[in-house]
Amino acid sequence: MRSPRYRLRFCATALTLAAVLSLTACQLPFLKRGAAPTAPAAPAAQGPCVALALPASGPYAPISGKIGRGAALARQELAADGITIRLETINTEAPGWLDKLSALPPACAVVGGPLQARNYAQARSAGAVDQRAFFTFLPSLEQGDEGARAWRFFPSPQDQIDALIAFAADSLNIRTYGAFYPSDAYGARMTGLLEQSLTRRNMPLHKAAYDPADASSWSTAVAPLINPTQAGGNGTPVPQTAFEALFLPDSWKNMDMLTTSLLYNGEDRLVLLGTTLWEQSLSGRQTPNAEKYALAVFPGAWNAARAPRALQAPGNDFWVALGYDFTRFAVNLGLNSRLTTPEITARAGRAAQMIRGMAPITWDGAGVAHQRLFIFQPSPTGISPLNLEQFQQTRTAVLQRAALRMQGLPAVDAEGNPLVPGLPPAADQTPAMPSQSGTAVQPATTPAALPLSPTPQPSYKLRLPTRR
């Protein structure tokens, strides 16, 4: 081993003769004679950064936990592919959350969230949406903001309307619609969107509102839409409904009373169109009397049957898929800084291929998101994806049974066997409904069995079926 004095002489000589070795390298006491000097180790490459702006406390904290779980699943999956990401979560319930977001490096350019409109308003007011690309988990943004200052990574009310009309008009060829809606802001807004969309297709909408606080008045409120008459003087209401599909923008807890109000007026043939409010109440729960809703459908963004393997564990739902999809999407955006709005919109269109857990999302040229939602039905176990062929067969059977009933003919033979195949069990027709005074009003019962007509009348559009 050479002495320290020798090493210092060697360094001085090297500097004088070549001036190419750094003094730092020469001062390393462990540098072996004859070994080539090594360059300083390069810093480890920083992977893509994804930020989530979510509440860690309050009523939305459980939802945030699910979104975070989905993001963690995506991070694990990406790591298995050799992509290490930096995942930052900012608590929007904490004071100064925008300061914490601002302290993140510019490379954390993509923000998922926030989850609440008030937090988005805060970020907007502080100018944070102009510093980073916000893809919010909100159904709508402030007027003029979407695609201009921020983007949406969440289904909108219009997405729901588009899915329902596409199903009813394009799959069932239904051209006439009704809406029976609560006289609150949500009911009026959703019905207005439906009417606007139908007008663009030159299709009419018949509508009536009801007082959501007075269920006893609903059968009276819906009567003008159904316009029932009496068949042959026997007291059985025969509907003269001018449409084939009825929009019901209300929560699932009111569906039993709403469908009972329809039955009270003799109507059980309509395709019932709900909103994502139904999914929130039905998911993972038992549905009593699910056969009553054989013709009821609603839209949703999460279809477990189509989920990727990473999301197929029990307990995963839309919110987990949201976090999973957004994380993969954000990485695929490839943003290290906030680019111009058109550039971000264009990248979002290309990155949309990474959306695999939720229904597909696309962004149009104006940066407005459109999510092609799935269609579901109530089932005894909660919800199930629509089987279109089975639905069409059931609807045909329901129309045939109704035609028999309106002619005063039974739907079963003398032994009680159904005359119309493929029918779900029938709900009691024209049930008693509470009157305005609170006293139950019992309408006439279904007429006694009559000889079966050899020609059932499946059509009910705008005419009273003839009695044979």
Image (tube, grey):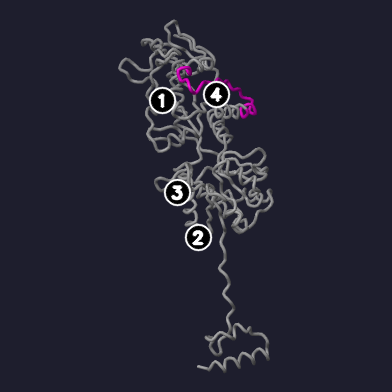
Give me the disc on residue 311. Answer: 3
Give me the disc on residue 85. Answer: none
> Which residue: 51% across, 44% down?
358
Whether residues under marks 4 and 3 lie with C-beta atoms below 8 angstroms apart, the answer is no
Whether residues under marks 1 and 2 lie with C-beta atoms below 8 angstroms apart, the answer is no
Q: Position of residue 319 (x, y in %)?
A: 48, 44
Question: Badge 1 local density, few (<14 within 10 Å), some, or many (20+)?
Answer: some
Q: Nearer the viewer, residue 177 or 89?
A: 89
Give me the disc on residue 183. Answer: 4
Q: Nearer the viewer, residue 442 or 293?
A: 442
Whether residues under marks 1 and 3 lie with C-beta atoms below 8 angstroms apart, the answer is no
Magenta stretch? 196-218
> Which residue: 47% across, 57% down?
76
In terms of image quadrants, where is residue 207?
top right
In terms of image quadrants, where is residue 189?
top right
Residue flagged by tag 4: what amino acid is it? Ser
Q: Earlier in the sequence, mark 1 or mark 2?
A: 2
What secondary structure is marked by label 2? Answer: loop
**In the image, farthest residue toward the front:** 95
Question: Badge 2 local density, few (<14 within 10 Å), some, or many (20+)?
Answer: few
**Whole-Å distance between the Cαs marked 1 and 2?**
48 Å
Q: Which residue is mark 2?
A: 81
> Which residue: 65% across, 50% down?
344
Q: Which is closer to the viewer, label 4 or label 3?
A: 4
> Which residue: 51% across, 49% down?
323
Q: Which residue is mark 1?
A: 292
Q: Earlier in the sequence, mark 1 or mark 3?
A: 1
What secondary structure is marked by label 4? Answer: loop
Residue flagged by tag 1: what amino acid is it? Lys
Which quadrant would the C terminus be assigned to in this image? top left
